[in-house]
Image (cartoon, rainbow, N blue to C red):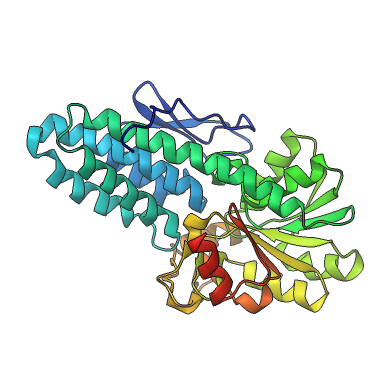
Amino acid sequence: MKGQPSPVEPDDPTGIRAVTWRDGRLDLLDQRRLPADVRRVVCEDVDAVIHCIRDMVVRGAPAIGVTAAYGAVLAARARLEADGAGWLAGFRTDVARLARARPTAVNLAWAVARMLRAAEAAADGADPVNALLDEARRLHAEDIAMNVAMAKHGANLLETPGSVITHCNAGALATGGLGTALGVIREAWRRGLVTRVWVDETRPWLQGARLTAWELGREGIPATIIADSAAAQVMRKDPPTWAIVGADRVAANGDVVNKIGTYSLAVNARHHGVRFMVVAPTSTLDGATPTGDDVPIEQRDPEELWEAAGGLPAGAEATNPAFDVTPAGLVDALVTERGVAMPPDEDSVAELLRA
């Protein structure tokens, strides 16, 4: 960090700017309300950032990591004002709470650890808050640059024009800008290699129907929304060239943890001969976690399911896992900013982490 110039505000190439720092505050596009209502939420302290992460104002592993980095800036500023020279102790407590806001996406803990290291390096400096803001902006800019690199690597795998299918939202809304899976789709569309995008609704929050379709529509990329359960029928009748998804964590053996329903899509893809691509930055690769079964899977409030169903029938119960595990053996390509693992396994994931 020492000796590097202060970065300017990173520029989202899509213009969506899901996460941005403005006038000394964190400004988030409220993803719970899209596409009907384009509204922003302003966070002035770390507690507001934690709430926005937990309540899915912001979602998507890379975007949560970027959000956490700016949340650390707010925490440092408040602790410096309250505790003076002893600010670092309280800051550690605040960012530990921030790291626990959602358990599954590894980018959150990764970003918090990076900001803690930056805070410790800046603790004796004249202006630690600005040093942390520089680091947050740098992390944000790096995320966008990684998305651009992944878009090119992933698009290179598409050989002939055709449709693709995706699940959940792995676009500019889920990252610092451009997107992981949607970054690849955007680049492939630009090259004339994508003719249509089949968009899984993604129950129960409908991130595909609400968010992915909205992003694609803004750029004139043809998108057709389908129920999650319709993916197999689409593959049987009109096979896409690829299924392309993001990831919230990739274990050391290549198992992929992503939005619930990804595993089903991968099984369907393998049965129908559709290749399956996972697009994720190396910050999402978790070499310390051996397999997907070792990843804590967030269990969300069953009320989210009841709302989608119009109310829970008497005597019924509900469970609402937010993520599932797709075994590495079902993944044909893992695309990162450092290159592609085909197929992903313990050796190829380790090589990407060493690169």
Q: Choose between 5 and 41: the one closer to the eye.
A: 5
- Residue visible at 78% across and 66% down in the picture: 230
Q: Quick check: 6 above or below 193?
A: above
Can residue 338 be seen in the rendering of this structure? yes
Left or right? Give the position of 86 relative to 345: left
Give the image quarter of residue 135. Answer: top left
Give the image quarter of residue 325. Answer: bottom right
Q: Choose between 37 and 274: the one closer to the eye.
A: 274
Q: Quick check: 169 above or below 47?
A: below
Looking at the rendered image, the quarter that the N terminus falls into is top left
- Residue visible at 22% across and 47% down in the picture: 94
- Residue visible at 17% across and 38% down in the picture: 123
Left or right? Give the position of 79 relative to 235: left
Coordinates of residue 106 in the picture (x, y in percent):
43, 60
Furthest-top residue in this view: 23
Q: Quick check: 192 above or below 298?
A: above
Coordinates of residue 178 in the picture (x, y in percent):
62, 40
Give the image quarter of residue 278. Answer: bottom right
Coordinates of residue 153 in the picture (x, y in percent):
69, 52
Coordinates of residue 181 in the picture (x, y in percent):
66, 52
Can residue 315 be seen in the rendering of this structure? no
| Count of number-bearing discs | 0
Q: Choose between 308 and 258: the one closer to the eye.
A: 258
Q: Quick check: 46 above or below 274?
A: above
Left or right? Give the position of 81 relative to 248: left
